[in-house]
Image (tube, coloured by chain):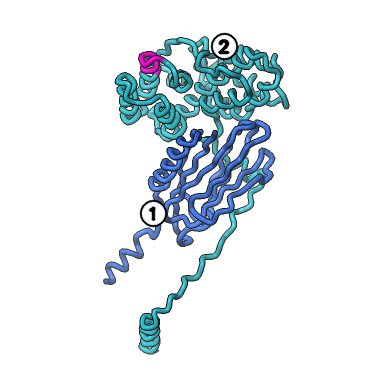
Amino acid sequence: MLSSVLLVGVLGLAACDSEETKVEAPKPEVVAPAKLDIAALQSAAENVALVPSPAEMQRALERNGIAGGLSGMVSERTLKMDIENKDVIAVRTGVALADALLTVKDAPPEKLKTRLETVKAGMAALGGGADIAATIDDINARIVNNSVSRDDLIKELDEMHGAIIPEIKFEAGERAVPLLQAGSWLEGSNLVAGAIIAANSTTAGTELLRQPQVADYFMKYVAVEGGGKAPDEVLAQLQTTLTRLKELASQPTLSLDDVKEVKSQTDAVLALL
Amino acid sequence: MIAALLFAALTPTAMADENAAEACLKTKIWEGYNTGWAVRTATNATLGQGEHRIYLVTLYAGTEYKIMVCGDDKLQNGDIVLYDSLGNELMKDAQDNREPVINYKASTTDTFYIAVHATRTVDPKAKAGVATAVTYK
């Protein structure tokens, strides 16, 4: 029986070869993606793509007709990374990265290099590994040698912010990435609010600052754990600020007064850094 | 011969390769820079047939967004579906391949859900590396 079956099979194959018949493989069944309801979406949603980058904020600002951009509004600040609190280091590193991103187009080489050195120091303090340090060193060398165009630098820093840093496993723990993002977002929101106020725009606040889910996402990480430990001043203020930003952003529209409050709330955190 | 067959049977038929998916996506991201696109986020996942990942995103009104997916060679058809904050389906890609793309411009600044599906893999047990990027212009 078995030999008969094998014989038929062999003969069948031989026939196919001799006639050079092209037999199309059966097409695989097309399966439609599963339908998802809101409960399924909410329960499984990841926040890795939730937060707009500072560069994206800048473009959205320009799209709303607010000229000048954010680069001229970035203030000089010294962000120290030789402190114990890793959460605060992460927030500071995010601010420094936002400042570098927003000024990469026209900052003098030495100033840009200093900002990136600050980012590098923050990454090192968070245990970001040797690769990111080497990447920043390489970028800085090319800035100093003037061997990279500013347009290419924008791409490299943009990719570092959006694609490389979120994938780093920091020794400081899983909180490092969202807190770093919080720093960048806070700095970007502060500058956006300042630009809206300067332009006296009554409509841009709704388009640019209404992001309650982003504030909510950061609040989960900023919530200071108890255990009798006094909360860090920066994190305590950050929690207060995010709580208020969420309330403001949850409204259907943001007035110019709301935008002014966004500015003062974010100023309060940045002043402590 | 038997040993070879046994080895083949015991070897996972489909090892997901997130690196291959990521390399494909990086190429697309860098090509996008030449035409004015920039990247918000890029992330990787390993998905079996019928599995999906969901990403919450904030999209600015008036900004053009391009959501791109690259699957490794274990993925035959990947799909992207965009939902609004209430769970209403807004759009999905119409391609039957492992590199789906959708473009979207929001009329109001809001949060949205992006579902990335490994709709069909080379065999039902295969695990595919899937890389996703949210880019904007």
Q: Disc 2: which chain?
A: A
Q: Which residues, given as a range, are shown in magenta?
A: A108-115
Is-magenta flag for residue A113?
Answer: yes
SS for tag 2? helix
**Residue B65 place in picture, x, y as percent:** 57, 37
Q: Hue of chain A?
A: cyan
**Residue matched to label 1:** B15
Residue A130, label in figure: none
Give neighbour class at mark 2: few <14, some 14-19, many 20+ (Cα, 10 Å).
some
**Residue A180 place in picture, x, y as percent:** 47, 24
**Residue matched to label 2:** A268
**Residue A207 place in picture, x, y as percent:** 66, 26
Magenta stretch: dominant secondary structure: helix
Q: Is residue A17 among the parts visible in the rendering?
A: yes
Give neighbour class at mark 1: few <14, some 14-19, many 20+ (Cα, 10 Å).
some
Q: Residue at x 38, y 81 (%)?
A: A13
Towards the viewer: A134 or A148: A148
**Residue A138 place in picture, x, y as percent:** 31, 26
Q: Judge whether A75 appears above or below A252 on screen.
A: above
Q: Is residue A170 left or right of residue A230?
A: left
Is-magenta flag for residue B8?
Answer: no
- Rendered image quadrant of residue B115: top right
Towards the viewer: A99 or B118: A99
Q: Residue at x 63, y 49 (%)?
A: A36
Three-letter amino acid code of the residue under disc 1: Met
The chain painted blue is: B
User: Separation of disc 2 and disc 1 at Cα?
Assistant: 50 Å
Q: Is residue A165 left or right of residue B61?
A: left
Q: Residue at x 69, y 16 (%)?
A: A256
Three-letter amino acid code of the residue under disc 2: Ala
Q: Residue at x 43, y 32 (%)?
A: A159
